[in-house]
Amino acid sequence: MSAGPQEPERLVVPLPGAAPARVVAQVTVPAGEPRAVVVLWPAFAVKASYYAPFCAELAALGIAVVAADLRGQGESGPRPGRGARYGYQELATRDWPAVVSAARERFGVEVPLYVLGHSIGGQVTALYAAREPKGVAGLVFVAAGSVHFRGFPGAGALRVLLSTQLAAAVATLWGYFPGHRLGFGGRQPGRLIRDWARIGRTGRFRPSGADIPYEERMAQVQLPVLAVSVAGDALAPAGAVERLCAKLASCSVERWHFAPEDGARVDHVRWARAGGPVAARIGEWIAGRTAG
């Protein structure tokens, strides 16, 4: 009998030009040499450690996982406050490249590397791909969609529009978004929430301080993409997932819907605790890319 995945390692990645900011990641490695590496970026207010069972499932399939806490979330720092000045632009230009570089240094450039984004992690991953279209072997979105209100069905569209704009107003007045007090999204910097709300209102990815035309560049990216929607996910329904994928118009996108056959209850976040089938689907998809 072969040994199972090893205990996660802790990887600390300093962020260039943003001291003392850093990203801390949990690295889960398979028993043998990995056939691929996945860099995993979480949703708002979800710690990297929450994905541990899912990471173990991928590692059991021979895939190493670098699960990073978003800046200011979990072990990554500093904690967002009124002085925080970062949003989607800073995450796409500093945090994502720094962690991908650290993952490559850890596992070597010869091992195929994929980026997996959950929720906002998927949105920023699309921006990162626009900047580094040849930097990774492919993209995986799980429960990740555009927050544009038009991607939500029925009355949900109005709720998304109102809630995103209210969050932006609160973040502007408060100096940061106190989601840890409001019960949604955790503590987040105001700029990040305003970027998020702008997508909710306009559907366009134009983060504060953008130095490239992201919409145009995203449409030019040519990478394989696996987009996974989740049953019971009110925060990234199928329409929202499709809107995010549509931004990557030149990519080869494969869609898959996760609805547990055993009746397990999943949603926008809980899929990670019953993610064996998702891991298996990702493993099959990566194997297909490697064979290709």
Image: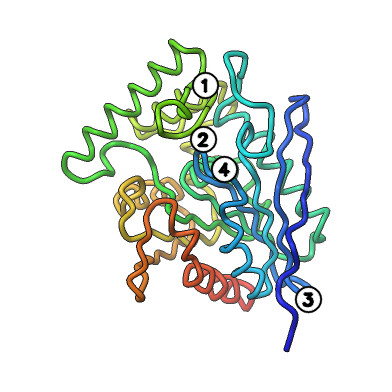
Residue for badge 2:
214
Picture quadrant of residue 150? top left
Of the residues tagged 1 and 3, which is closer to the observer? 3
Residue for badge 1:
191
Of the residues tagged 3 and 4, which is closer to the observer? 3
Under mark 3, the amino acid is Gly
Say which label, 1 or 3, has the lower sequence index.
Answer: 3
Q: Are marks 4 and 2 in contact (CB under 8 Å)?
A: yes
Category of crowding for the residue at label 3, using alpha-carbon neighbours closer than 10 angstroms: few (below 14), some (14–19), many (at least 20): some
Residue 16 locus on image (x, y percent): 78, 30
Identify the element where label 4 is drawn.
helix
Q: CA distance from mark 3 to mark 2?
A: 39 Å
Above-or-below relation of 21 to 52: above
Residue 168 locus on image (x, y percent): 40, 21
Is residue 234 visible in this depiction of the protein?
Answer: yes
Residue for badge 3:
32
Of the residues tagged 2 and 1, which is closer to the observer? 1
* Residue at left offset 71%, top offset 76%: 4
Say which label, 2 or 1, has the lower sequence index.
Answer: 1
Say which label, 4 or 2, has the lower sequence index.
Answer: 4
User: Of residues 212 and 156, which is closer to you in this image?
Assistant: 156
Residue for badge 4:
130
